[in-house]
Amino acid sequence: MLRLASYNVNSVRSRTELIGLWLDHRGNDIDILAMQELKATAEQFPGEFFESRGFVCHINPQKRYNGVGICSKFPPDDVQIRFNRPVLDAQARIIRARFGRLDVWNIYGPHGDLPGTDKFRFKMQWYDQLTDLLKTSYDLETDRVIITGDFNITFDDRDVYDPIALAGSIGTMPQERAKLQALLELGFIDGFRHLHPDTIQYTWWDYQGAKIWKNQGMRIDHLLVSPAALPFLREVEVDLWPRRKNKIKPSDHAPLIGAFDKGILS
């Protein structure tokens, strides 16, 4: 089995100890670790820590903000962090790595803001450019592609603990959800919802109000697979263990893990 984990670590330097404990807890079964919000420069990234655990890491860093990385137990054949799209390249939010026949995209979608703001417009433009890039790069019926990461958007009201109270808030607005729908219209499949059509499961919980213990969260971390990759998908789970830590401050996200048949690489 090939296990791909997406984890918004909310500062890799602050979460290094927790990541180590989590990997130990799982028996070091993660083969590809896609992280978002590294919040570190290349010099600040704890590369030796991951190397000591058998990972090869490639990152798209940014000081204090954003930053994404892919660490894997085997080296990728190709890595890309620039995409010749001005909005996509404006901030460190995407890294793509190819492993055999599989392309893995790790994204940290913009948080955005309310309509009419510059941050809202940037988020809309960012997703438009991402969708166009993917549309022109692949034949999803034959190309094995996975897009994972923190999208900062919910698909529908099943992904929000209180759809009425949170209606119109960031991550739930129709304009945002339309951007996720555009990715599905390209052909991508929401891996979690494909396997768990009726399950209520969140990936992010606000630090305030002990929301993790009340399960008052949102599902904003996703794993999208192309039709060519779907036959290899075996499971998608959210690992709550590192989010429920008290002695070590956790990220506000929990890792999302997809399990695939290893044949997806070849």
Image: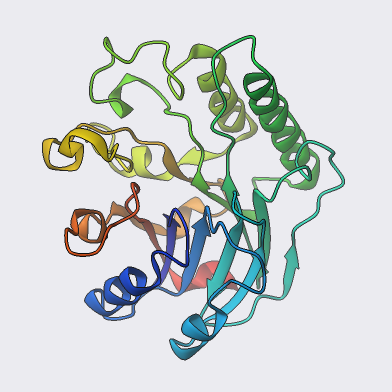
| Residue sitting at x 48%, y 34% | 152
Q: Quadrant of residue 154?
A: top left
In this view, which residue lies farthest toward the right?
84
| Residue sitting at x 51%, y 38% | 151
* Vertical order, 137 against 152 (above or below): below
* Vertical order, 73 against 249 (above or below): below
Q: Quadrant of residue 127?
A: top right
* Rendered location of residue 247, percent (x, y): 17, 64
Q: Nearer the viewer, residue 42 or 58?
A: 42
| Location of the C terminus (image quadrant) | bottom right
Q: Is residue 249 left or right of residue 34?
A: left
* Rendered location of residue 253, percent (x, y): 35, 48
* Rendered location of residue 134, percent (x, y): 72, 42
Q: Nearer the viewer, residue 140 or 17?
A: 17
| Residue sitting at x 64%, y 9% | 116
* Rendered location of residue 256, percent (x, y): 37, 53
Q: Is residue 83 visible?
A: yes
| Location of the N terminus (image quadrant) | bottom left
Q: Nearer the viewer, residue 18 or 155?
A: 18
Q: Is residue 32 left or right of residue 228?
A: left
How many marks on residues? Answer: 0
* Model colouring: rainbow
| Residue sitting at x 36%, y 43% | 192
Q: Is residue 143 visible?
A: no
In this view, which residue lies farthest toward the left?
214
